[in-house]
Amino acid sequence: MNSQLTLIFLLFFTSAIAETFKSFDSHPKFPCKPPHFSSYPFCNVSLSISQRALSLVSLLTLPEKIGQLSNTAASITRLGIPPYEWWSESLHGIADNGPGVSFNGSISSATSFPQVIVSASSFNRTLWYEIGSAVAVEARAMYNGGQAGLTYWAPNINVFRDPRWGRGQETPGEDPTVVSEYGVEFVRGFQIRRKTKVLKRRFGDDDARYDDDGDGNGKLMLSACCKHFTAYDLEKWGSFTRYDFNAVVTEQDMEDTYQPPFKSCIRDGKASCLMCSYNAVNGVPACAQEDLLQKARVEWGFKGYITSDCDAVATIFEYQGYTKSPEEAVADAIKAGVDINCGTYMLRNTQSAINKGKVTEEQVDRALLNLFAVQLRLGLFDGNPREGRYGKLGSNDICSSGHRKLALEAARQGIVLLKNDHKLLPLNKNRISSLAIIGPMANNISNMGGTYTGKQCQRKTLFTELLEYVKKTSYVSGCSDVSCDSGTGFGEAVAIAKGADFVIVVAGLDLSQETEDKDRVSLSLPGKQKDLVSSVAAVSKKPVILVLTGGGPVDVSFAKTDPRIGSIIWIGYPGETGGQALADIIFGDFNPGGRLPITWYPESFSKVAMSDMHMRADSSRGYPGRTYRFYTGPQVYGFGTGLSYTKFDYKIISAPTRLSLSGLLSQPSHKKLLLKHGEERIRYLQLDDVMVNSCESLRFNVRVRVSNTGEMEGSHVLMLFSKMPPVLSGVPEKQLIGFDRVHVRSNEMIETEFVIDPCKHLTVANDVGKRVIPLGTHVLFLGDLQYSLSVEF
């Protein structure tokens, strides 16, 4: 019996795959098609989402239910329900990494925005929202063309904890606040299409959001997925792989580093999907950890479906040995709260798990209710999607001029100027007779987008875009590839460098060095790249311009201190418009304003075990800590580093000097706290003791004047940091509590303000993972300015 059922499930799965690939035609297949299949209660749009989902589940047989537990959900022919592919990708544009997207049709490309780490460097919330919205338009247009689904597994909101991580490029960086804000903006822009208006400010972050369209029915344009939950940031390092790694995380680090982005993505972004990760967390696989997944639903209010990463249910047994059988692995995942398995493990083992009493059909029903509820919110059961709200979106909405301009703006705003000695940049194109471009990435388009890049609208290299500015531009690779194992091409590079007015060397990383399933072992430039740069710099007529590619930081201390290298520009993976963005910056058509969202460590940091998940430094064992918040060692470039062609000055116009927290507690709690401490000084206030909604009354504004005292207009990122009094262990060195991107014309000034919530921005987790507000003097930093705030009780 069991073997027969297994065969049935495999037939379901095979049939679903075949039908899914056939569905890549000019029209998407949909349920509730009249006249034969439109009369079911789940097709009745007047009923609530939950009523329709319950009705649908009640009509299914057990084999049909199990057939829905894969990313490739089987068709239910007797009910007129076609197969559905849950797995589509949209990290920074529509990508065909998953089976849900195909470019083999009338739509052959989609806008490729910069990799996330580059867009994050803009520190522009409005831009992040706009990117999410633009990608959503193209995704829905591709769905209407039968070439994509409605559920997408992005964004990646893991904190970029270790600089060697191959997928750090996919994230918004190392700061939990920035990662949280990015996730919220991208998800909001992606899931709900609002009645938009043109961006109020081209360069600045005015923090204005579009008015909601008033649809309070929980409808979704598309579904976004916050991944990978949680403490996932290791691919393959030493003897560890992402499939068997056990992330040992303290309660303190979990609360104020690893979890905040997911909490925000769910609570503020209203994400409709959550993906659990491969790794175990403190001994329990993430996809089998019920307290972890239920925290999202119960405490954070998650309303959506939970998917495993691909084959992450299988790894519970196959790699981690957490259970004694495949059936137990499936049962543990379903009971923990996983609704769908990317892969076939649930298809193959759920029936057997039910037969053995490991899991019940009712628990499978719960998973299906979550899955169908999201599909219903997407309008999948509302009839022909071509006649629906988004039915008019089509090929004209993909690779549009507006989206390509947005991609260019994102690349311009994200590129970071790290060094510019003696104002070498910008170059005057009218005074340059020749230009030499050197480096294997300078004339290679294949890796300009980074991981999860689809088919780009246009394919232009850095070299071809620079050629638009200076016609006499020559190029040699210097190295045969980014690995640069040989110096045989150095002679040709040196020769063209000698004859050019200016030389640009493009060095750094590509996907051969860092990617999914591949971490780096060194922070230095790969192979002989450093020798190539130095050889060219030694013969160049003028200081060299060094352009760095890649998502992870590299130790370029040699270039930072070498006067023969006049400028350093980090472009990351800038997407399809990256070449134009770089050229615009080099020749002064755009004033750079990006800031690094990660710390750039020296090569010596590679001695630190990547498997050590501790964030805080520990001098007793020579552990330097991680990220700018806790790292105590030397650095090449710090978090937030970024130069401009102009000069900005700040002045704090208004901010409180004293803040009393006594109003946060009820009278009984106040007395209880005083009795508990007696004559001992109260060092901090625990948020668990704070009255509900009382924090709002203590919010305050820090108003700032920004002046552009230089000769060039530009956008500028303001970063407000706080340093807490060290009244408990593990207090950060400093932490970001506010950021804003503003545009200021030359010799003009503007005013902006930060809204500070003490219960959010002035808190830290204690050693048992409870949020507290330290009492005493908090020092606020804005550039070189310092401002003291006394927090009292």
Image (cartoon, grey):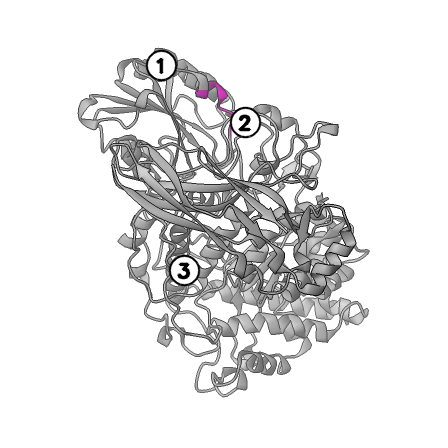
Q: Is residue 455 visible?
A: no
The residue most toward the top is: 539
Q: Secondary structure at mark 2?
A: loop
* Residue type highlighted by circle 2: Gln
The magenta stretch is 554-560
* Residue type highlighted by circle 1: Val
* Residue type highlighted by circle 3: Ala
Q: Secondary structure at mark 3?
A: helix
Between 355 and 690, the one nearer to me in the picture: 690
Query: Which dot marks residue 136?
Result: 3
Q: Position of residue 361 (x, y in %)?
A: 72, 75
Between 123 and 137, the one nearer to me in the picture: 123
Would you say 121 lies left or right of 346 here?
left
Image quadrant of residue 312? bottom right
Mark 3 / mark 2, whichever is N-terminal: 3
Mark 1 / mark 2, whichever is N-terminal: 1
Residue 380 forms part of the magenta stretch: no
Q: Which residue is mark 2?
A: 635
Q: Secondary structure at mark 1?
A: helix
Query: Which dot marks residue 494?
Result: 1
Residue 555 forms part of the magenta stretch: yes
Q: Which quadrant: the N terminus? A: bottom right
Position above or below: 778 against 154: above
3 or 2: mark nearer the eye: 2
Instruction: Residue at 69%, 37% (x, y): give it.
Output: 612
1 or 3: mark nearer the eye: 3
